[in-house]
Image (cartoon, grey):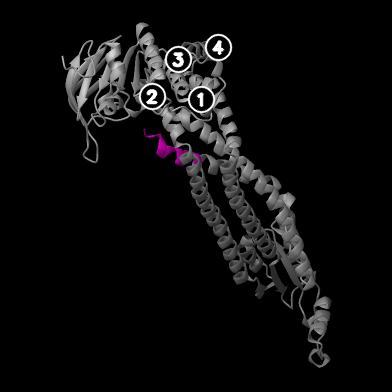
Amino acid sequence: MKIRTLRLLTREGAANVYKNKLMSAASMVTITTTLFILGLVLLIIVNVITNLEAKKRDLQVKFYLRVETTRLEQEEVAIFIENCRATGVVTAYEYESREQAYENAKKNLQNESLMEGLTPDNFSEGYFVTLANPNDSDQFIAKLKLLSGVNPKWITYPKQELERITGIVRVFNYAAIFVLVVLMVISILLISNTIRLTVFARRKEIEIMKYVGANDWFIRFPFIIEGMIIGLLGALLAYLLTSQAYGWIVDGLNNLFSSIMITNLELMKFDQFAIRILVVNIIFGMTIGVIGSFMSVKKHLDV
Amino acid sequence: MIKFVDTTKIYSNGAVGVKNITLSIEKGEFVFVIGASGSGKSTFLKLIMHEETPTEGEVYVNGYSVHNMPRSEIPYLRRSLGVVFQDFRLLPNKTAYENVAFAMQIVEALPREIRRQVPLALGLVGLSKKAKAYPGQLSGGEQQRVVLARALVNNPAVLIADEPTGNLDPKTSLEIMDLLDEINQRGTTVIVATHEKSIVDAMKKRVIMLDRGELVSDVKRGQYTNED
């Protein structure tokens, strides 16, 4: 097909969007609705995943030294941890001296009598370590056990919690893919139904074109352009709606959670996703439009 | 040019379209296909333009084997034919000019050619002044002229007309027939299906008569009823 024919047919398709205003609007609303729902669901999923990942990073490896450690052993442990931080395995750590441990215990127990006879020397130094990658925990703990100053019985890591969170993140990832696929299928069905109505209203026209000797692409191309334009418009509209609605949802949730004293909810700003949402919307919208057109014209071409 | 070899068309509901037709039409001929309603006239024309395919036998048109044609070749067959339908079949949202131009656009003619040929074709059918009118704004006769202009604009070797005057008054009918004759004089093969006696009798052309799908007579310079 020649360039000028493509240009002619593109113009034709664009003009048809306007000429069939009602059908175009109906198709656009379908695409906008699905993309809007899709956008919100994905944003919610991304938020959940982000919060869970943040939670995962907060999980700390806690370990204590032996009560009877030598200075040398204490230094060995300090150097090991410092090295781990330098190489990036550990993002941060807290050190708790014997005195601090003693004070903390006193504060937590709130019962002087239980602390009677105890001095800071009965306590041991502790480290609370945040790992850069929680999946490194096994390896990290294995190395700790090689250090003679570390009491191997007093190394704790909330492994179960980590696994639970990892599991939940995985579920949400699958959920995201599932929602994506289901909404895509639904919207293709809806849109092809709408376009099928358009095509049905214009099947006489398609027949006439065939009888005059137009080949399939000549007929199909304007419809595809039409679907593409409608998809693009629907995607842009959905983007605007999503950004507005997301803003409202974030405000609402923040108000709600601060009113019940939960302040560590990390909701993402829409701007962080704006480009991605826009790109996803445009790609989906146009794909849905094109596939819808393609499917619904097909049937009427066999004359 | 056009050749039917023992061609039969039975529709899926069992109705007979045409039965064992064998005939040929040469280049430059003017042929009437006549018969009562249901005699197979329309089927005969539909087989030529691959609107229907024969259940048995062969159909050759302009070098194409229409009876076993790949789907992708159908548009090319149709572009070698000019077709005039009883129900006009104009694109309703295009002007007369655009409808005629459409036939040239699908063969990817140069825009310059289109601007030159379309007014000529509209002039030939006497519609120059209505170029910008939409089909809905034209009378039946005028619409049929637009269809004729569209059928002619690519200079097809064969022009097929199915009851071209079926929806027109007698005076307009004669004008359309004169146009078809004129087109034939310029070398185009013309095949007209009709049941209008007066027209066939007046024109003295080859007449092919069908009855219940069968070829009952084929006469050079014939009349509608060959009592003589």
Residue B125 versus residue A74: which sits nearer the camera?
A: B125
Residue B176 versus residue A74: which sits nearer the camera?
A: B176
Q: Earlier in the sequence, mark 1 or mark 2?
A: 2
Residue displayed at 23% across by 10% down: B221
Which amino acid type corresponds to the residue marked 3 in the rendered image? Val
Q: Are marks 1 and 3 in contact (CB under 8 Å)?
A: no
Residue on which the image places disc 2: B75
Q: CA distance from mark 1 to mark 2?
A: 28 Å
Which element type, helix, strand or loop, lies under badge 3?
loop
Quadrant in which residue B196 is drawn: top left
Q: Are marks 3 and 2 in contact (CB under 8 Å)?
A: no
Where is residue A280 drawn, in percent x and y?
A: 62, 46
* Residue A299 highlighted magenta (yes or no): yes
Same chain? Circles 4 and 1: yes
Residue on which the image places disc 1: B138
Query: Which segment did they paint magenta?
Result: A293-303
